[in-house]
Amino acid sequence: MRCFTFVSTLGLVFAATDADNKVYRRQISGVELLTLNGIPGLGTFTGVGIPGECQNLPRNINTFTTAEATPGFVCHVYTGGDCTGSFITVPGPSLLSLETPTWQSWVCNCAACSD
């Protein structure tokens, strides 16, 4: 009986060790990818998201004067929701030289990554 108890205890110890060595997926909350400046009444908006996933802008943010992508990323800001319609690329030409439409969504991708 003692031998069985010892073997059973070892099984529990090894099972606990295996469970401790497992890597579990964590919820990804996102990273700062895009900064929009010159927003009337607000100033600056920082877009936080997961690279490659489209983000709709809050309803109170639809115009801005300059945009910056986090180094290593290229972003597109779209005129339509869910990353549809016309877009500008950030980094890209200055918005001051463009007609300013209403912006509704954005997505950023790794600049050095291939699709």
Image (tube, rainbow, N blue to C red):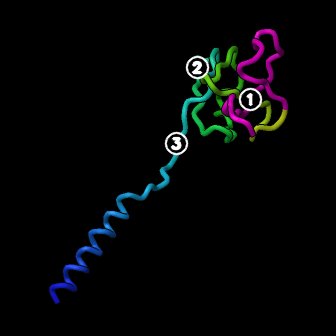
Residue 1 lies in what quarter of the image? Answer: bottom left
Percent x, y for residue 79? 79, 30
Percent x, y for residue 52? 68, 39
Q: Evaluate if marks 3 and 1 touch, with contact meaning CB atoms under 8 Å apart.
A: no
Choose mark 3 or mark 2, whichever is in front: 3
Residue 57 lies in what quarter of the image? Answer: top right
Q: Name which residue type carries label 1.
A: His
Q: Residue 29 has which mark?
A: 3
Choose mark 1 or mark 2, whichever is in front: 1
Q: Secondary structure at mark 3?
A: loop
112 relative to 29, above or below: above
Give me the residue at 25% from left, 80% from top: 8
Q: Name which residue type carries label 3.
A: Ser
Residue 36 lies in what quarter of the image? Answer: top right
Q: Quick one: 55 or 100, which is closer to the camera?
A: 55
Q: Name which residue type carries label 2.
A: Thr
Percent x, y for residue 58? 64, 34
Q: Quick one: 19 or 92, which is closer to the camera?
A: 19
CA distance for labels 3 and 1: 20 Å
Q: Is residue 11 left or right of residue 71?
A: left
Residue tagged by mark 2? 44
Q: Secondary structure at mark 2?
A: strand
Percent x, y for residue 5? 19, 83
Where is the C terminus found, in terms of image quarters?
top right
Q: Evaluate if marks 1 and 2 touch, with contact meaning CB atoms under 8 Å apart.
A: no
Q: How many C-alpha atoms fall within 10 Å of the one at disc 2: few (<14), some, or many (≥20)?
A: some
Mark 3 or mark 1: whose residue is earlier in sequence: 3
Furthest residue toward left: 2
Furthest residue toward front: 3
Asked if the magenta segment contains residue 109, the reply would be yes
Q: Which residues are magenta?
A: 86-115
Residue tagged by mark 1? 76
